[in-house]
Image: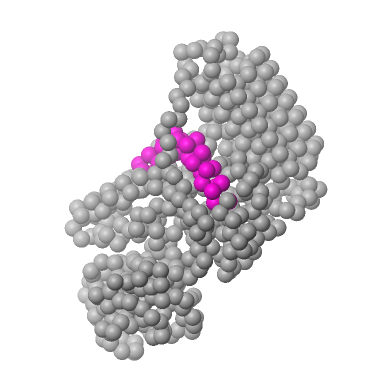
Amino acid sequence: MMHDIFIDFVNNSKNECLLKTEAHFAMHKQSWFSTFEKHFQAVCTDIVKAQDESVISAISHLEYAMKYTNFLNRRYVAEVWVYGDGWYLNNGQRMIGEYDVSLLFVNFDELWDKLLAERKRYIGKVSAQEVTSLMIDALPKFYSYLASIVRFAIIDCVDKKPYIDILKNDVFKVRVGDYMSKTEPVFTQKKKKDAEELADWFSERLDYDYVFEDCAGLDFSARDFSYTVLRYIQFRRAILNNANLQFCSLIGTSFYRAQLENCRLDNSAIFEADFSYANMKNSSLVSVRGRAGMQNKKHWQFVGFLPVSFKYADLTGTDFTDAKLAGADFTNANLAGANLSDADLAGADFTDAILDGADFTDAVLDGAIFTGAPPKGVDTAILKQRAPDTAEAKSEPIVFSGNICTRAEFMHHYVMEMDGGAYLPKVPKGEDTVIVNVSGSGLLNKIDYDTRSEVISDRLKLLLEQYLPEYIFVPIVYYDAAKTEQTIFWRFKPPLCEDIQAVYRNDGVVSHISYPITNAPIVFSMRSPKGIRSIVCRMAVAESVLRRSILGLKFTKISDWAVSEPT
C-alpha cells in the first residue's frame, strides 16, 4: 500500500518535471537550435580532419548516444559517435565529441533529488536503488528533446561545408538514442535515389515504411501522393509543383526551399513540417492541421510539436481557409493576397511578413505577433508584442578538436559492483546447487547482484548469458516455506583473467588496467593480491544492463594505466 502511494507520487512528480522541461524547450528552442548548429559544424570539421589523416574512413552513421554510465553519474552529455557500414559491428567506430545537454536535465535532477528525499518517509519500503531504477525509466523521455533539436537544427547545416566534405557511404544517417541500442534516424541522406522508383513505392501507400526517406532535390511535379503517410521525409529542394498531397500525414516533413506552386495539401496533418524558403504560390492548405505545442497541456505524453515553419516562404495567393496553425512561424514570409479566413492562427508569428491584400476574415489571432500595424480589421487588443529570445541555452558544445580517440571508446571496461549495503541470505561456498531457506526476505525482488554470495538474479542471468554463451550458470534456490514461494538466483564467477596488468583499490577492487587487452571475453573476472574478485565487462554490457533497470548494482569505469598513471 505504501509503495503504491509512492509510485503515485513518482508519476505525478515526473509529469510535473517533464512539463517544466517542455516549457523551457518551447521558450528557448531557437537558442538550442543555434547552439547545436555551431556544435555540429565543429563536429563535421573534426570528422573531415580525421578522414584527411586516415584516422577514420567513410562513415554511414553519426549518432548522438545516451550512455547510462554517464547519466547515472549525473554527467549529462550526448556522446557523438561515427560508424561505418557495419554500424555497431564495425570495429572502426569512434567517439568524435560530446554535446552538453545539462540544461535539458535540470528538471530531471530536481525529480531525482525529490524522490530520494520522499522515499525516506516510507521507512525502508523504498530503497535508493529503486529510485535509481525509476530514474532510468524516465531518462529516455527527457532525452527525447535532443532528437527534436537535432532533427530541425541540422537542416541548415547539410547543404554547406564542412558537412558536404565528409566522406560518406551510399546511405548516411544521423541518429539519436541509446548507445548500442534503440535509436531514431532523424536524418537520412542517400547518394543513389530515383524519383520514378520512389513515386511508384509511395503509390503503394504503406503505413510506416517511408519515414525519414531521402527525396531531396528530386522532381515529383504533378504526382498524386494523396492519402499517404509521408512523415519526416526530406523533400528538401524537391520540385512538387501541381502535386496532390491532400489528406496526407506530413508530420515533421521538410519542404525546405522546395518548389510547391499550385500544390494541394488540403486536410493534411502538417505538425512540425518545415516550409521555410519554399515557393508555395497559389497552393491550397485548406483545413490543414498543424497546431504547435502539446495537445494535452496537463499530461506529458511526448515532446510538444514545434511550430510549422513558413519562414521566408513565398505564400502569394495561398489558401489557408480553416487551417489550424496556432503558433505557426510566418516570419519574413510573403502572404500577399493569401486567404487566411476562418483560420486558427493564435500565437502565430508574422514578424516582418508581407501582408498586402491578405484576408484574415474571422481568423483567430489571439496572441499573434505582427510588425507595425496589423492587417485591417484585426483587433489589436488581442495581439502580442514580440519578445526576443534573450535567454541563451548556455549549452556550449564540447568537442574533441583534433583529438579523436585512437583506441575505440567501446573497448573500455567497467567493474560491476554492488550499489547499497543490503545482502541476500548467505549462500554456502562451492559450485553446487543449494536450497537456502528464507523467511519473509523482502530483498529477493530488490537485488539483482550480491557480491558476498557471488550470485545474480534470474533476469540478470538472462542478459549476461547472451555475452557468455558457453558459461554454465548454477542455480541457487531461495525457498520461503511460510509462503511456499521460491526465487531462483545463479552462481556467477565468470572466467578468470590473470595475465592482465592491473592496479587495485584498497578494498581489493580493480581500478586501473593496462591496454591493450587480448584474448579476454566480454565479461571476465580479475583477482587482487588480497583474493578479492572483481567482475569486469566492456562498456556495451554495462549499458545493456543499466537500461533494463537492473537493481542493486553499479558500474565504475576502469582507468587506463598507460594514460592515467596510478599513484
Q: How many marks?
A: 0
User: Which quadrant does the C terminus fall into?
Assistant: bottom left
Magenta: main secondary structure equals helix
Identify which residue is drawn at 70% across, 22% down: 316
The quarter of the picture where residue 67 lies is bottom left
Position in image of residue 445 (x %, y %): 31, 68
Identify which residue is drawn at 47% across, 76% down: 516
Look at the image and tell me whether residue 48 can be seen.
yes
Residue 39 highlighted magenta (yes or no): yes
Please state which of residues 485 and 203 is positioned toward the viewer in this rendering.
Answer: 203
Q: Is residue 340 left or right of residue 36?
A: right
Position in image of residue 290 (x %, y %): 58, 33
Residue 258 highlighted magenta (yes or no): no
Position in image of residue 146 (x %, y %): 49, 47
Identify which residue is drawn at 53% across, 37% down: 306
Look at the image and tell me whether residue 266 can be seen.
no
- Residue that sits furthest to the top in the current view: 377
User: Which quadrant does the N terminus fall into?
Assistant: bottom left
Give the residues in magenta: 15-44
Identify which residue is drawn at 30% across, 82% down: 528
Position in image of residue 330 (x %, y %): 59, 26
> Quick check: 183 above or below 557?
above
